[in-house]
Amino acid sequence: MSKPKLAVYWAASCGGCDIAILDIETKILEVADFFDVVFWPCAMDVKYDDVRAMEDNSITLTLFNGAIRTSENYELAQLLRQKSVVLVAFGSCASEGCIPALANLYDKESILDYVYSQSPSLAGGNGLRPQTSVEVEEGTITIPEFWNTVRTLPQVVDVDYIVPGCPPQSNQIAAVIDAVVDILKNGKPLPPKGTVLGATEKTCCDECERKKDVKKIKSFKRPFQQVTDPDICLMEQGLVCLGPATRAGCGAKCVSAGIPCRGCYGLPSNVRDQGAKMVSALASVIDSSDPGEIAAIISRIPDPTGTFYRFSLADSMLRRTHR
Amino acid sequence: MSGEAKSESKFEPKIIGFLCNWCSYTGADLAGTARLQYPPNMMAIRVMCSGRVDPGFILDAFSKGADGVLVCGCHPGDCHYIEGNYKCMRRMPLTQKIVADFGIDPKRVRLEWVSASEGARFQEVVTEFTEQIRALGPLQLRDYKFEPEAREVHHVEA
């Protein structure tokens, strides 16, 4: 019997998800042994035309990381959807936009203007902008179109499962692979479509071992402004910790090391907008009933939108700026 | 979605009002019983407390076509649940800041205190807020929905 086929693709991403897959150590040998890896741009040379030539539904499992930022990302999302039985939005970029989606606070024009004209590292800028196609002697050369809005993978194609995290933790990836092998080898039933794999239903606070008490915040601080107590909830110490609005699954690694949760595991179950949930959690514990004082305390939070939506802007209710 | 269907000349704002059960909803009821007239643009949603209004409700309303969101609760010190309205009061400036970052005028979100006996005040608040939203015009959500057919998709060589 031929081996099940595996594909891994990166769209608008940093490559960290591919590294995280390799980070499962010796288990990667099991993956290579069990699967026939047919497409993985980060690790092997396969052309897009080779994928186009594959039969529909011939790839058993595709782990798609990266957000949809360009027409190339979209074309590959459609192509891999067509060729795959199971398509997984792998990592924060594919499932909720992640860092690339912070660009949704701007528009295409202002981004291109900054990069090609305003950036301090440019010597003046000559007003040139990337063109999607150009005629040369040998024919037409094209590059993908840069979109105005970063989309998540589930916003553009039908997705079967989601593995959250920036990047997904290696132990969780290993557990997901074990589950997939179990399904394929032993005929275990597939989990219901849309299931979030490699994470739990609860929040990061649930995994955090710090002592939690009544939260009353008089002023917000940044991590470098104080020496944090190693045993007490970071939010109670005035740090903006996204634990209450973030899915558990990472093992609370950052908070154990004294760094507030940044929210990379995305929304917990039953939450539709991570940033709004964070506003709710954080503002409610401000220890003041005076509008002036409340405004002053809130002004100490640097860039609330960028902080609360650091990983989930494209997937948020408002998705982008509407200026 | 907002915008397209509405013409500028006949723009009628769509306003969602979250009214707390104990004060503001009763205040609205009083305005009705007293036959006080106010614009019909606000659709009231009764909540048990202004503290129940998750900022997500407000963003959800905008994403689904509201032009303005009004939250009304008991006056500070009068909350049926002691401090729900204070929680609402603390969330509002941060919510407005986020709304502004998403390119939506923060004046489209308003928090007002209306007690059960303030039917006239309810009339005043709704009238004034409706006129304010009317002046701001319809909320246009830009490039919100994914419309692949509207895009020129280039064939990628690789």
Image (cartoon, coloured by chain):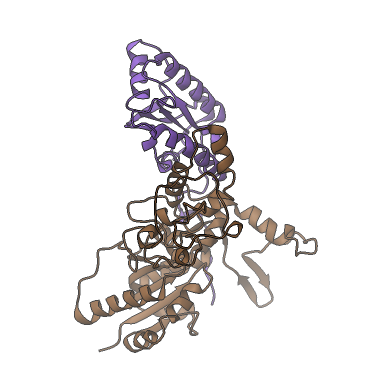
Chain colours: A brown, B purple
- Does the image show residue A133? yes
Between B57 and A119, the residue placed more toward the observer is: B57
| Residue B20 place in picture, x, y as percent | 36, 28
Among the 4 quarters of the image, the one containing residue A21: bottom left
- Asked if A29 appears above or below A109 in the picture, the reply is below
Residue beneath the point at 58% across and 57% down: A226
Residue beneath the point at 28% across and 63% down: A193
- Asked if A88 appears above or below A238 in the picture, the reply is below
Q: Is residue A202 left or right of residue A101?
A: left
Number of numbered discs: 0
Among the 4 quarters of the image, the one containing residue B87: top left
- Asked if A95 appears above or below A299 in the picture, the reply is below
| Residue A319 place in picture, x, y as percent | 48, 50
| Residue B86 place in picture, x, y as percent | 44, 34
Residue beneath the point at 56% across and 59% down: A223
- Asked if B136 appears above or below A276 in the picture, the reply is above
Between A122 and A221, the residue placed more toward the observer is: A221
| Residue A17 place in picture, x, y as percent | 46, 73
**Quadrant for the C terminus of chain A in the image:** top right
- Does the image show residue A58? no
Q: Residue furthest right?
A: A124
**Quadrant for the N terminus of chain A in the image:** bottom left
Between B157 and B97, the residue placed more toward the observer is: B97
Q: Residue furthest top?
A: B34
Residue beneath the point at 33% across and 18% down: B29
Q: Is residue A250 left or right of residue B153?
A: left
